[in-house]
Image (cartoon, helix red, strand yellow):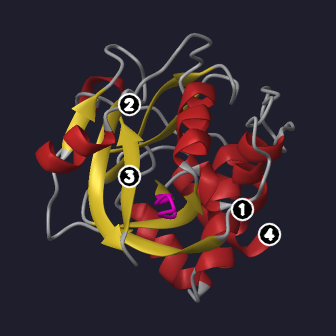
Amino acid sequence: MTKEKKIWYASYGSNLLEERFNCYIKGGKPNGSNNFYKGCTDKTLPTESEEIYIKSELYFANKSKSWNGSGVGFIKTEFDENKTTLGKMYLITKEQFIEVVKQETNNNGELIIDFEKAQKSGSLIFRKKSWYGNLLYLGEQNGNPIFTFTNERNLTDKINAPNKEYLSMIICGLKETYNLSDLEIKEYFEGIEGIKGNPIEKELEKLIRKE
């Protein structure tokens, strides 16, 4: 019997923090969020997790009810070798991946994702007009495909700053995943749309030091 391949779910936002991502697996309410997640049918935690450098640009946009109307993270739909978004990926089953996506996109119905088609084309819009309805293929690691998701278009007309709670969660995730200094984390965020030029930019140093 051939062992079924697992899938790497790659995160670049609040799910960088493993404790927060695990709420999608085993259920729970993340700190600072208004949402309670029911978790997956299979509540087995990821068998592996590791860093990933995504060659696309991070930005913050839309108004999230989960985070009191603040912006949340997205990556641009096109890849750019000159841009790097720091991510973290988790090795989970295909069924868990689909259930994570359903929770992330508030989908209570049936969801079928053609992973092979996404691999061949590089992306797949599995739910139109959903915030995170665009599946992106990021390659393979140890024979298992890597996927993340973002919007079907670049939301440059809906740029919106993240709140302190959401940004703090990402900062905690970066510190958990990468060996970065406080200055390096500050420099990482300073040029990002949704942060640069907004009041939250002046809070960066304090938030990073606090976390």
On screen, residue 5 above or below 30: below
Label 3 neighbourhood size at 10 Å, few (<14), some (14-19), many (20+)?
Answer: many
Q: Earlier in the sequence, mark 1 or mark 4?
A: 1
Mark number, residue 210: 4
Question: Which residue, given by chain and number where applicable, does mark 1 sit on?
Answer: 18
The answer to whether residue 154 is visible is no
Nearer-N-terminus badge (1/3) = 1
| Disc 3 to disc 2, C-alpha distance | 12 Å
- Can you identify the residue that label 2 sits on? 113
| Near-viewer residue (63 or 4) | 4
Q: Is residue 151 above or below residue 168?
A: above
- The quarter of the picture where the C terminus appears is bottom right
Residue in front for this viewpoint, 95 or 152: 95
Q: Is residue 96 left or right of residue 152?
A: right
Q: What residue would you read off at disc 3?
A: 147
Residue 193's spot in the image, x, y percent? 35, 47
Q: Is residue 122 visible?
A: yes
Q: Nearer the viewer, mark 4 or mark 2?
A: 2
Element assignment for label 4: helix
Image location (x, y in percent) of residue 104: 58, 31
Q: Nearer the viewer, residue 90 or 179?
A: 90
Q: Secondary structure at mark 1?
A: helix
Which residue type carries mark 4?
Lys
Do the numbered discs 4 and 2 sit on residues whose CB atoms are within 8 Å?
A: no
